[in-house]
Image (spheres, rainbow, N blue to C red):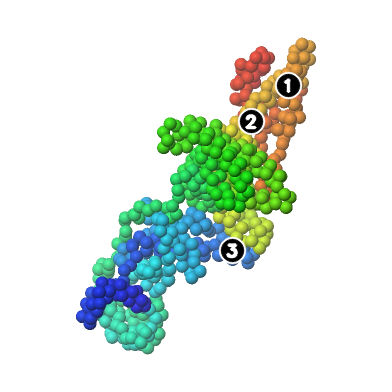
Amino acid sequence: EIRTTIDYLIDMLQCEGFVGDKVSTSWLDERIEAQVKPEAPLWYLAVIGGAVSKAYKALQARMADFVSYLEKGQIPGRNTLLEAVHSTMVLDGVKYETAVAKIGPQQYKVSMNGSSVYVVARPLRDGGLLVQLDGNAYVVHSEEVAMGTRLLIGQKTCLIEKERDPSKVIAATAGKLVRWLVEDKSHINADEQYAEIEVMKMIMPLVSSAAGVISLEIAEGQQVAPGQLIARIKLDDESSIKIAELFKGKFPSMGPPVMIGNSTDQKYNDALQSLLLVLAGYEHSVEENISKLLSAIDDPELALRQWQQAISAICNRMPPQLVKKLNGIMKAYEKSLTDGVASDPASTFSARSSPRSLPFPSDAVLNTIDDFIESAAQSEQMQLQITLEPIISVAYIHQGGREAHASRIVRQLLDKFLLVEEVFNTDAQLSDIIEELRHKHKGAPQEVLDIVVSHQALPTKCKLLFGLLSAAIMPNPQKYRTYLRRLVAIESKGAQEVALRAKHLLEHSMLADLRAAVARSLSGLEMFHISDISDAEVEVKKKRQQNSMPESELAALIESDVVLESSSRLLRKTTRQEGLFSGLEQADETLEGKMRTLVEAQAAVEDPLASLLDHPDNDIQWRAVETYI
C-alpha cells in the first residue's frame, strides 16, 4: 500500500529510540526489518467512524435526489428516505456488518450483533465529520480508495478494506506498468513476482497472493488507474482462499454521546425533544420518553429549575427592585416545597406526598411583572418586556398548574401529528399529494422533504399517539374532544388503531351528554300522546325540561363542526363514524318512533340505557327497559 510517509515519520519521531537520541543505521535497519507500522485507531472507533461516514453520505445523497426531483418539477420515487444504511467492512482480516439509523438531524444509532451505540455527527467545512461518542469527540475523515475506505481519526489512520477476490488482480494505486515478468496464460506460484510498476519515480514489483494460471489484461507501458483490473488468475486451489472472518462480538458498553444530567428540567427537555423527533420522522423509544416526560411535568421542581435557569441569564439586566420582589415570591414557593419534603434532609422533591398541591406562583409573578412594567416610563416599557421575556414564558407555561402544563404539551404533540397526517388523509395518490405540496411550498423543497420524512414514520408516530391517548388523554378526554374528532377522521393505512382508540375516548367523553339525550328521548313531552299523561305529569315534565340542556344546545353539540387549530385553518373532514349522537336528531312525534330511533341509532346508547334502569322516574325506568330489550 502506497500512501504518504507522514504517518510513518510521526510514529518514528515519537518512538523511544528517537526521543532518547539512539538513532543509528542499525536502529533504522531494525525498524525496517520489523516492518513497524504507525498506530491505528481502536477497532470499534474505526468501525463506528466508517459506518457513520458511509451512512452520512448515503442519506445525504437520498435527500439531495429528492430535492433535485422537486426542483425539476418531477415527482420523486417511493424510497424510504430514512431507511437504515447497512455496511460490510473488513478491518485487519475481520469482517464487520453494521446498520446505521438516523434518529435525529445529527444523531445516529449504530447497531451490530444486537448491540447499539449512539453517535452525534456534525459535518465540517473540510468534508470531515465531528463525531461525538461516549462523551468524547473525534474528527473523522474518510476517502474512497482502490482497496477500500481510508479513515483518518484524529492523527491515526487505517484502511477499511473491501472483500478481496484473489482471482482478480487490481491496481492499488495510479502508475505505469513497466513490464510483465511472466508470459500470458503461464503458471505462477504464491508470493512470485509477476510484473513491475512505476509509482512516484520508483520501480516496484507486484507479487501474487495465490498460485494459478495468470491472464494478462493490459499491455506493457500502459498507465493504470487505482482499482483497475490488470490481470486474472485461475486459482489452483480455490479452497485455500482466506476469507475474512465474520465478527460475532458486540460493541463495548458506551454512554450517550452528550452527557445528560439527572435534574428534572434536563430529563424533561430530553424526553420532549425525543418525542418531537419521533413526530419529525426519526426513531426513538416512545414508551420510555412518554413516561419520563409526564413524570417530569408532575414534579414541582421542574418549574423551579426552569425559572432559575431563565432568570440567571437575565438577572444582571433586570431592575434590582423587580429582582427583589420576584426573589421574595420564589423564596416563599421554595419554602412551601421544602415543607413538603420528608423529614430526611437528603430526600429529593420526588419524596413529597402530594406534589400536585404545590402549584407554581405564575399569577403572582405575572402580576408583579405587569405592575412593574406599567409603573415604568413609557420609553422603557418595550425594552423591559423584551428583557423579561424568558421568565414571562416560564410563568405562562406553568400557569394553571401541572394539568394545564401537561395539556399544553399534549396539544402541541397532537398538533404536530395532525398537521402532517391530515395532508395525507385523502383518497388521492401519493404522487398527487406531493405535487400539491410542491406547489404549496414553491421555492421551499426542504419543507416538502420534512413533511414526507415525517409521514414515512407513521407506524412509530402512531405508537406515540396511542401512548398519549392512554397515558395523558384517557383520564380527562373532555378537554380533547376537538383533537379526538380529528383523530377519528384519520383513515390512513396504519392509523386504524389510533382512530379506534380516539373514537372510544370520544364516546366516553360524551357519555354523560348521551345519557341526558337518551333520557330526554324517553321522557320528552313532545314524544307522548295527550291521552298517555295527565296535566300534572305535563307540568312536571315541563319543569324537568327547563332544567335540562336546551334543545338548541343539544343540536349545536350534535351538529357542530370544528375548525382545525392549526396554521392551515382547514375544515375538519366530516365522518359518520364519529357521530356519537347520529340518529338522535331525527324528529318523530310518537313514543314508539322515538324508541325505534334509539334502537336503530348509530350511537353507543346501550350504556346510557342501562344506567337509566334505576332512574327515579318510573316512566323512564319502564321505557328504558323496553328500549334496551
Residue under pointer 2: 510
Residue in the image at 34% along x and 65% along y: 41
Residue 542, horizontal then vertical, whole percent: 76, 18
Residue under pointer 3: 67
Mark positioned earlier in the residue sequence (3 or 1):
3
The amino acid type, in three-letter code, at marker 2 is: Met
Residue 184, horizontal then vertical, whole percent: 31, 84
Between 538 and 588, which is closer to the camera in this rendering? Answer: 538
Secondary structure found at label 3 = helix
Cα separation between marks 1 and 2: 19 Å
Between 313 and 539, which is closer to the camera in this rendering? Answer: 313
Q: Is the N terminus in the top left, top right, bottom left or bottom right quadrant?
A: bottom left
| Labels 1, 2: front one | 1
Q: Is residue 72 visible?
A: yes
In this rendering, the answer to whether 541 lies above or below 404 is: above
Cα separation between marks 3 and 2: 46 Å
Q: Are circles 1 and 2 on residues that touch, CB within 8 Å?
A: no
